[in-house]
Image (spheres, rainbow, N blue to C red):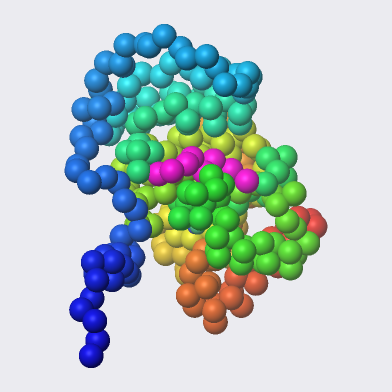
Amino acid sequence: MQDAPSDRDALQALLDFHVEAGVDLALDETPHNRFAEAAAPPAPARAPEQPREAPRPAAPPPRALPKMAAAAPEDVATMARELARDAQSLEELEALLREFDGCALKFSAKNLAFADGNPKGRVMLVGEAPGADEDRIGKPFMGRSGQLLDRMLAAIGLDRSNVYVANIVPWRPPGNRTPTPQEIAICKPFIARQIELAGPEILLCLGGPAAQNLLNVKDGILRTRGRWFTYKTEAGRELRAMPTLHPAYLLRQPLQKRLGWRDFTSLRRALDGRE
Ligand code: URA
């Protein structure tokens, strides 16, 4: 006769059920009103304890940003544009994003996944949003999609020492859902400024959301992939830009890898001045 399932078995089964249903993020036992928390006055400062280690010099000192979590999304997007425009370096932009509280995704994400690779590279690749691996590590394209991306880059003689990688949204949406148009609108000024400050020669948009939001194209990725567009920075500099299939899509649809391969050989030719 089989033993009755123990509490442990029941809990394990419940956990497995949640993971299978895509619930891979425990926020808390009870709901939190993050908007109210962010708008609340800061707790009174306590006398500092003896420091355990010497404080590390901060990169650029964090700026005191206005509290935005309770503001209307249009106002947040306007403030985000002004803030992003002020950043004079990628370090400043990253520090600013760490302080920015206008995008609710920040509160469920573990880390900001700002960038990976070489910001001086000739090519910048922009994806959609971090997944679980990227969120844990705090860098874009670290999981299976990132591994496929690295193999595709290697096939045309590139790697992360000579390309720069980022996402249109730098925080993981819970359960890997697609970022909402509002979240994208709020984050867009930051990625636009990131592209401008990195100043690549070529921008590769990985997947439909990156292409549609950065290149203002309406067509789906299967229509736009492999075509050259012009991306114009706010300062008026023009870059060559190409949408291509997202590596996560290629993992699901391996037969489409031949299209990805075509796009990457086109990128290689452009870098060699042959296209
Ligand atoms: N998918 C993306 O679009 N970006 C990542 O960083 C990882 C997966």
Q: Residue 140 at x, y = what percent?
A: 55, 50
> To which quarter of the image does residue 266 belong?
bottom right
Residue at the far bottom in the pictured view: 1
Please determine whether, in this image, residue 41 is positioned above or below residue 215: above
Magenta stretch: includes residue 193: no
Residue at 33 percent of width and 65 percent of height: 19
Q: Quadrant of the N terminus?
A: bottom left
Q: How many marks?
A: 0
Q: Which residues are the magenta region? A: 109-116
x, y percent for residue 219: 41, 62
- Rendering coords of residue 53 (x, y %): 61, 21
Q: Position of residue 138 (x, y in %)?
A: 53, 44
Q: Front-most of 150 and 37?
A: 37
Residue 224 visible in the displayed image: no
Q: Most prominent secondary structure in the magenta stretch? A: loop
Residue at image point 20% right, 35% down: 33
- From the image, which quarter does the C terminus lie in? bottom right
78 or 47: nearer the viewer: 47
Assess whether residue 114 is covered by the magenta stretch: yes
On screen, residue 262 versus residue 251, left or right, reads right
